[in-house]
Amino acid sequence: MTTTTRADMFERELRKLYHAELEILDLHADLAEAAVSDEVEALFTDHESDTVEQIHRIEGIFEELGEEPEAAGSPVMEGILAEKDEIVSTDAAAPLRDLDVLSTGMLNERFEITVLDRLLLLATELELSDEITTELAANRQEAKAALTNMEAIVERRRSDSG
């Protein structure tokens, strides 16, 4: 797909976000399984329902635009998945394993937030409906909350070890 207009870019980024959210379901399950502490495991397990809701919102945006939901991968998401595959297959010490899991989760949430920021800007410039921007903003808020929770655990552990 050639990107020559804002509308093209919006469509490309929406497909990229849809693909990422579909992948996140498995990503979070794998990260929860790889976690050592109950706290980190719960963080990823508990986020599953948010991810399902985010997917439904994205599908609603496609519907609002009169399009069928279509996923398109991105090199960034593929890199995050490769990172996850690497940490899941290694035998790191418990504190290091949780740090690997949290770091991968934070990479994912930052990627998601970046794509959502781009979509929100484009939606405004394209004067898309308030419904679309509200759904995108809700997804961004949930991604930011997940990132904040992960960062809090890392910061708490850093303070505890210092």
Image (cartoon, grey):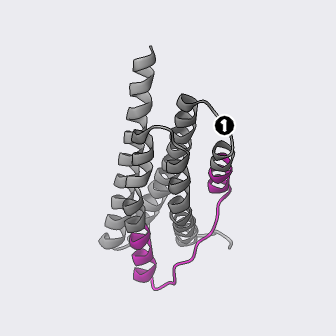
Magenta highlight on residue 79: yes
The location of residue 95, given as percent across then percent down, is 53, 29
Report the number of numbered marks. 1
Q: Quadrant of the C terminus?
A: top left
| Residue 73 position by quadrant | bottom right
| For residue 143, above or below residue 101 | below
Relative to 148, residue 132 above or below:
below
Q: Which residue is mark 1?
A: 91
Q: Is residue 125 magenta?
A: no
Residue lying at 51% horizontally and 56% vertically, measured from the top left: 29
- Tell whether 61 sits left or right of 15: left
Q: Is residue 106 above or below residue 73?
A: above
- Front in this rendered view, residue 92 or 102: 92
Q: Position of residue 100 (x, y in %)?
A: 57, 37
Residue nearest the observer in this picture, 72 or 104: 104
Instruction: Check disc 1 and report its element: helix, strand or loop.
Output: loop
Q: Nearer the viewer, residue 119 or 82?
A: 82
**Which quarter of the image is occupied by the N terminus?**
bottom right
What span is in magenta? 55-83
Report x, y in % for residue 44: 44, 50
User: Would residue 95 be visible to someone looking at this image?
Assistant: yes
- Most common secondary structure along the magenta stretch: helix
Q: Local crowd at mark 1 within 10 Å, few (<14), some, or many (≥20)?
A: few
Q: Residue at x 67, y 56 (%)?
A: 78
Answer with left or right where residue 58 lies relative to residue 2: left
Q: Amino acid at mark 1?
A: Asp
Residue 117, percent from left and from top: 45, 54
Whether residue 108 is visible here, answered yes or no, is no
* Residue at the (40%, 46%) spot, across then down: 43
Instruction: Name the residue rendered at 57%, 77% in the picture.
Output: 70
